[in-house]
Image: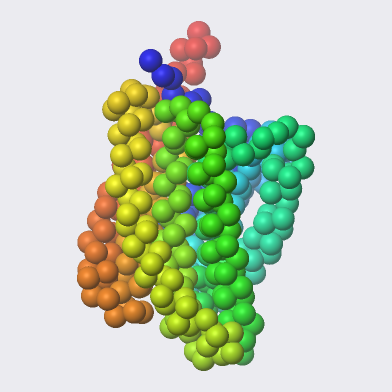
Amino acid sequence: MATAPPQRRLTPEHLSPGYFAFVMGTGILSIGASQRGWALLSTVFLAVAVVGLAVLVGLNVWRFLAFREALGRDLRDPAQAFLSFTFVAAVNVVASALAGFGAFGASSALLVVGSVSWLVLGYAIPWAAVLGRVERPVTSAANGTWFICVVASQSVALVSATLEPQLPEAREVLAVLAVFAWSVGLALYVAVAILVAYRMLAFALEPEDLTPAYWVSMGALAITIVAGSRIVEMHSTPMVDAVRGLVAGVAVVLWCFATWLIPALAAGGIWRHVVKRVPLAYDSTWWSIVFPLGMYAVAGMYLGRADRLPIVAWIGEQWIWIGMASWAVACGAMGWSWVAGRRRRPSLAA
């Protein structure tokens, strides 16, 4: 029988860089609840996301100061390094949610942090984990986490497009940044999809390899749709006018493909856990399912409004329930894993 991959505890030394996906999933549900008009629920989700972001930033600073070797191993590991982009996406998702509450100053500050970290990690991570490695072929380590670089890029586009109507003095700069980041993200999706598809076709794919992180392939499409929908709604600027029609059409095509991916990804999970009997054990990659499900709901609502597609908007409005249910399941599993881990450690020591 196959065995589950080892879990990483929520401690500074063993902290997975992918835990920022918790903030991403919680923040996008805040945005989704706001779109449905659920102000109180949106506020609660946003508060949890902000607290989670602050705690995880503190833990990662601690890890950088006290466990730099462990951090360096993750950044050089092509199977783990791209999880670092969850920090960029988490910061920008919170920024977008704050903008929905009128906190444009805080949202702008977070956009600066997210944009700078996106640029730095966008060059540093591929070099450290892929191009700079002696071992070949590196594509054997390609997996669903590589799509998170796409999510990071599109999160910059999303916040830029969200703030553009509210900051007329920075309208030109935000328009350029939104279109630039959206275009880079779209190109990165194509490149990553080719590499991951090649890995799946050229190397053996064990059940343990088909982790929940592959759901990010759909989440990356969903956030590309949301960012594109916001770009379509932006004020007239030379950069936006040049791509408005293209972005609107591409967003519809991507929504169709994201919808098609959902049954395939669900079937992969059934094959892994039901057919191949890989134990269903919690790890931080569970949040890689929550964020795409929530983002798909938001994508439907935004796209339906921007392109006047009522059926797409209706699907998004109903899908938010699935996103919230997955968040509750992941939270329960995370809490139970902590309790079980504390019980297990004293018995192992004895």
Dividing the picture into quarters, in which one does residue 226 lie?
bottom left
Q: Is residue 286 above or below residue 31?
A: above
- Residue situated in front as seen by the camera: 311 or 19: 311
Locate residue 301, reporting x and y percent. Answer: 31, 70
Residue situated in front as seen by the camera: 126 or 174? 126
Residue extending furthest toward the top: 350
Name the residue at 29% across, 27% down: 274
- Place of residue 9 in the rendered image (x, y in percent of width and height, measured from the top left): 52, 31
Residue 177: percent from left, percent from top = 62, 75
Q: Which residue shows up at 41% across the image and 53% down it?
A: 218
Q: Residue at x 35, y 51 (%)?
A: 261
Q: How many marks?
A: 0
Q: Is residue 335 visible?
A: no
- Tell me residue 287's x, y (percent): 43, 45
The N terminus is located in which quarter?
top left
Q: On the image, which quarter does residue 221 sit in?
A: bottom left
| Residue 312 in sight here | yes
In this rendering, position of residue 138 left or right of residue 295: right
For this orientation, the residue located farthest to the front is 202
Q: Residue visible at 67% across and 56% down?
A: 122
| Drawn side of residue 7 relative to residue 66, left or right | left
Pick the residue in front: 347 or 286: 286
The structure's colour scheme is rainbow
Q: Is residue 163 left or right of residue 42?
A: right
